[in-house]
Image (cartoon, grey):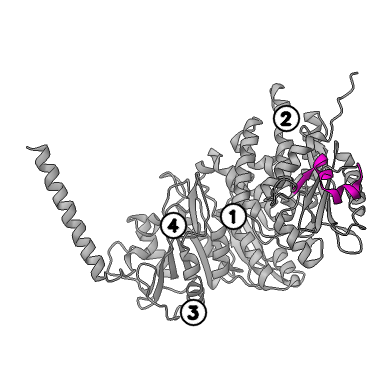
């Protein structure tokens, strides 16, 4: 049997230098460029002081962190040599202890090759010993950015808590991974499930054995790990929805293996495990990218709520530790995660633990997407036990006491004492005449809500302006039985690339809407994001109406008598015009327009004259 060719550390050179460049380091030789920060092997000996410490030995790289602080990176050719790489990097660092010019306080080991990917482990010398570099208590799996290095130095501690995460980088990486899976012959509707399996497989104390060259063995290892995690969480029934299957065509086996290995590499480069321990639903953001390419998601009318909106709603709804929250159309769990994160920020650790065990409920009609919601919650630490796959119209929540803690549980009949205190939801958009109308989901959710409690829902604008059954629902169900607190117009391209105008509605259950009751009308058509290369991303140059209206909206929901400043085109509190035969309940029907200035009037008149003259000239040229 021929021997497998041995890989060399040469494979790591491009990986290390490319990642350092991406992270923001100047990878030029410091001896040749004043702002250069990276010596590579032989270049290390071009510095006299470094040469005097190392003699003729050379690590793969030395990074110049500052004028006097260094970071040593050593590489080995196989994953099993990662610990050896770290140890040798520490040995190199020890040689600088007597140097008057440098101290090596960071070390990293890199192990792997182009075929099997690379593993990374880093450590920091705190003045006494080398300690692991961790992000949100999880070992860093990528090389360090300049910001991470500075954070460690400031605190003299290898642990970084809630490091800043670049959302645009995550979205870009997700798009890149989608392309990797495409090249690996993974069908679009399977990619979110494949991603879930890979993420679950990374939760164990050791990563999948991606040095295994046999595709069926590697896939078996990943599946076994994913199934084990789901089983330990009491959700083994969801495994079939994330299971990775070997392609039927043998030619695609090697192609799929490469796609899986490359994807795991990209996830490690993002420190994905630590990111999922942060206060932001990055897993949901990942899923949005993969679901965007799945036609079946759009066929179901599934449009996932952007994460900045779910966070905004959890904030203005003021989710508290004593609340019980529900989303009957939970998708990948974005609203539930936002509620859990908000409680984590305002409550104690004990309150968070109780909340995630007893107070988070969701239903998703599509079993595959429900599996993704479960995985999402597993990465949040819990909250997955009360997420189920099913028909929300056939499931009702009733009060339940769990070990002395107030909670809820699903049953087949509506309870006379519904236990839910806050609903946040984005029902499937009705794409066909036969589809269940969005307001039916609102009615079902209200049935689970306690009297006087609050519901938020994203709805197509058409639901609040169309005649026929929509008008009948607005008049005879919504306003006849409940109080409309506020309506917010969202940006037209909020769900880009899906083109649909939407509003957010806030409703107080069980209190009929009186004619004198004010409604807060808000037109938040700017959300701090701009389109760039086919994606909507945060941009510092973009206006953000959500931040402008946040405090007013939050105060009004808590107290509808709150005095709201009238800001033309943005916000106004006033009663509904019940004389409107169409009963259009959208901000555009109620917001004031600003009085034009003299300059604006003059400019407008001049424009009208110019247009009229241009029309006359054009008409004369074209003739009769």
Q: Which residue is mark 3?
A: 559
* 190 magenta-colored: no
- Disc 3 or 2, which lies upstream in sequence? 2
Q: Which mark sits nearer the N-terminus, 4 or 2?
A: 2
Closer to the observer: label 2 or label 1? 2
Q: Secondary structure at mark 4?
A: loop
Whichever of callouts 3 and 1 sits on the residue coming sooner in the sequence is 1
Q: State the separation of the CA atoms marked 4 and 2.
A: 42 Å
Left or right of residue 123, residue 432 in this image: left
Label 2 vs 1, first from the N-terminus: 2
- The residue to which callout 1 is attached is 330
On screen, residue 448 above or below 611 = below
- Callout 3: SS: loop
Q: Main secondary structure of the magenta part?
A: helix
Q: Nearer the viewer, residue 541 or 196?
A: 541
- The residue at which mark 2 appears reads as 246
Q: Which sits earlier in the primary sequence, circle 4 or circle 3?
A: 4
Residue bounds of the magenta highlight? 38-56
Whether the residues at callouts 4 and 2 have beta carbons within 8 Å, the answer is no
Q: Nearer the viewer, residue 28 or 16?
A: 28
**Marks 2/1: CA–CA distance:** 30 Å
- SS at badge 2: loop
Does the image show residue 411? Answer: no
Could you tell me how far apart the alpha carbons at marks 4 and 3 are, in whole angstroms? 26 Å
Q: CA distance from mark 3 to mark 1?
A: 28 Å
Please state, as top left, top right, bottom left or bottom right, where the N terminus lies in the image: top right
Q: Position of residue 590 (x, y in %)?
A: 33, 68
- Nearer the observer: mark 4 or 1; the answer is 4
The answer to whether the residue labelled 4 contacts the one labelled 3, judged by CB atoms less than 8 Å apart, is no
Splitting the image into 4 quarters, where does residue 296 fall?
top right
């Amino acid at each position: 049997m021929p021997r497998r060719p041995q890989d060399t550390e040469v494979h790591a050179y491009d990986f290390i230098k490319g990642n350092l460049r991406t992270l923001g380091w100047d990878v030029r030789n410091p001896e040749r460029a004043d702002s250069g920060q990276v010596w590579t092997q032989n270049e290390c000996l071009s510095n006299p002081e470094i040469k005097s410490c190392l003699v003729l030995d050379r690590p793969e790289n030395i990074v110049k962190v500052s004028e006097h602080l260094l970071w040593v990176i050593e590489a080995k050719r196989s994953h099993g040599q990662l610990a050896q790489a770290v140890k040798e990097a520490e040995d190199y660092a020890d040689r600088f202890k007597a140097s008057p010019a440098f101290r090596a306080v960071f070390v990293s080991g890199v192990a792997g090759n182009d075929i099997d990917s690379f593993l990374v482990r880093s450590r920091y010398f705190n003045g006494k010993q080398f300690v692991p570099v961790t992000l949100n208590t999880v070992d860093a799996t990528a090389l360090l950015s300049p910001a991470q290095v500075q954070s460690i130095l400031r605190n003299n501690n290898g642990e970084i808590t809630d490091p800043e995460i670049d959302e645009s980088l995550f979205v870009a990486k997700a798009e890149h991974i989608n392309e990797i899976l495409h090249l690996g012959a993974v069908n679009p509707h399977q990619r979110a499930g494949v991603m879930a399996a890979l993420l679950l497989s990374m939760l164990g104390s050791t990563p999948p054995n991606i040095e295994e060259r046999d595709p069926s063995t590697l896939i078996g290892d990943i599946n076994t790990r994913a199934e084990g995690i789901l089983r330990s969480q009491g959700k083994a029934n969801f495994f079939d929805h994330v299971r990775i299957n070997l392609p039927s065509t043998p030619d695609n086996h090697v192609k799929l293996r490469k796609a899986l290995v490359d994807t795991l590499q990209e996830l490690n480069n993002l420190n994905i495990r630590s990111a999922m321990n942060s206060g932001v639903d990055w897993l949901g953001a990942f899923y949005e990218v993969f679901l965007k390419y799945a036609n079946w998601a759009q066929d179901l009318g599934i449009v996932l709520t952007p994460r900045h909106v779910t966070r905004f709603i959890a904030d203005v709804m003021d989710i508290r530790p004593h609340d019980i929250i529900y989303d009957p159309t939970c998708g990948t769990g974005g609203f539930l995660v936002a509620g859990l994160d908000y409680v984590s920020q305002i409550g104690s650790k004990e309150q968070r633990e109780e909340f995630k065990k007893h107070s988070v409920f969701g239903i998703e009609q599509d079993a595959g997407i429900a599996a993704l919601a479960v995985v999402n919650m597993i990465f949040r630490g819990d909250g997955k036990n009360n997420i189920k796959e099913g028909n929300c119209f056939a499931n009702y929540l009733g009060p339940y006491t769990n070990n002395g803690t107030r909670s809820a549980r699903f049953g087949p009949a509506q309870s006379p004492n519904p236990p839910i205190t806050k609903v946040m939801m984005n029902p499937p958009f009705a794409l066909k005449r036969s589809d269940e109308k969005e307001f039916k989901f609102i009615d079902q959710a209200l049935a689970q809500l306690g009297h006087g409690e609050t519901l938020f829902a994203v709805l197509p604008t058409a639901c609040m302006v169309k005649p026929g059954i929509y008008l009948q629902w607005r008049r005879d169900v919504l306003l006849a039985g409940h109080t409309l607190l506020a309506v917010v117009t969202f940006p037209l391209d909020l769900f880009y690339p899906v083109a649909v105008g939407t509003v957010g509605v806030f409703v107080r259950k069980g209190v009929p809407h009186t004619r004198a009751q004010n409604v807060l009308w808000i037109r938040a058509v700017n959300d701090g994001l701009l389109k760039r290369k086919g994606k909507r991303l945060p941009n510092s140059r973009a206006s953000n109406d959500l931040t402008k209206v946040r405090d007013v909206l939050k105060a009004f929901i808590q107290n509808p008598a709150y005095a709201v400043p009238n800001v033309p085109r943005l916000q106004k509190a006033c009663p509904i015009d019940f004389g409107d035969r169409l009963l259009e309940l959208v901000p555009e029907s109620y917001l004031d327009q600003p009085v034009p200035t003299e300059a604006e009037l003059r400019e407008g008149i001049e424009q009208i004259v110019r247009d009229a003259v241009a029309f006359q000239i054009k008409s004369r040229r074209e003739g009769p």
